Amino acid sequence: MKITEQQFEAFLDDLEFRDVVIPSTGEVVQMPLISKHNPSMTAAFTANRTKVLKLLKLPELVPADLGGDRTLITFTAIDYAHRNLDPYKEIIVGIPVRVGLQARGPTPADLVAPEFGGAEIYIRHLIVDTRLSEILGNELLGYNKFIADISFDQDEAERSVVVSEGGRKIFSLRIMLPKHVDSYEYVRDDNPVVTHKLGKLNHLSYPVAMKLPQPQPTKATVSFGDHPLGRILAGLDISTSEPVLVRWVPDWRLYSDERKLRTTEPSA
């Protein structure tokens, strides 16, 4: 929903923090994790639905059905320069799904609807670039995180990110920024995600607030390298220069609370 600039600025004001111990290391972190003054960019493309279904594996994870054997896949890159944790970068490759054996797949409109229109973003793997963010995400928030190299670049015309591991490129994403910003729109929402780990489905919802430049970008490209994950993504027949949606958020605020984690049993 739309909020005022004042509500946006006060979004994180009333949170209560507590110390939480990471089980494997005994390290203490402050929860919830908060984020503000951090840029985020997302681009959604179409992909081959049959091939995506093979990655999803579980029948109750139902991706979009756009016709012509096409579905949706999203790429999100966040620079967490300001959190109550040491700075890190994060990459999310997601598949919008609805969960349920009789569920209807999400639509492109759900990507900008409140709470994704009842859909969730299925995250097979989450990429970060620091040890603590990897361990915390895996042990407290239910993710399958791994560490890679993440490099951002930005000028007046575009913002880009290159993701690689061991010198091998996984993928790069570029969004073309608007030439002029006419105004800003402030939005409050909850972003639901789902992961499959240790035979269970983990559901987590993130309260977020966004400062959205108007107009928003419309152009983006993604390209893949020879890293094994890059080859998997390249094999999904992604529409690499024809995005369905592009979103640029120079100030993305949210908080991550492990108490919001909900676990369900898959049917198969």
Image (cartoon, grey):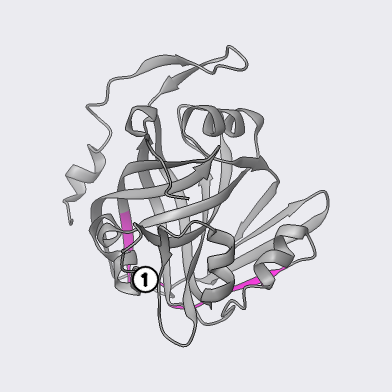
Identify the image quadrant of residue 221.
Answer: bottom right
- Amino acid at pointer 1: Gln
What residue is disc 1 on? Answer: 216
Q: Majority secondary structure of the magenta segment?
A: strand
**42 within the magenta span:** no
Q: Is residue 129 left or right of residue 57?
A: right
- Residue span colored magenta: 211-224
Could you say whether the residue bearing mark 1 is in a helix, strand or loop? loop
Give residue 265's position: percent from left, percent from top: 41, 41
Give residue 239's position: percent from left, percent from top: 56, 80
Q: Nearer the viewer, residue 152 or 52?
A: 52
- Judged from this view, the residue extending furthest toward the bottom is 68
Q: Nearer the viewer, residue 202 or 143?
A: 202
Q: Nearer the viewer, residue 58 or 36?
A: 58
In the image, residue 53 sits, relative to residue 121, either above or below, namely: below
Query: Which quadrant of the rendered structure holds the N terminus?
Result: bottom left
Label 1 neighbourhood size at 10 Å, few (<14), some (14-19), many (20+)?
A: some
Query: Which residue is located at x 43 percent, y 46 percent?
Result: 266
Query: Which residue is located at x 25 percent, y 62 percent?
Result: 117
Q: Is residue 8 left or right of residue 219?
A: left
> Can residue 158 be seen here?
no
In the image, residue 49 sits, relative to residue 8, either above or below, namely: below
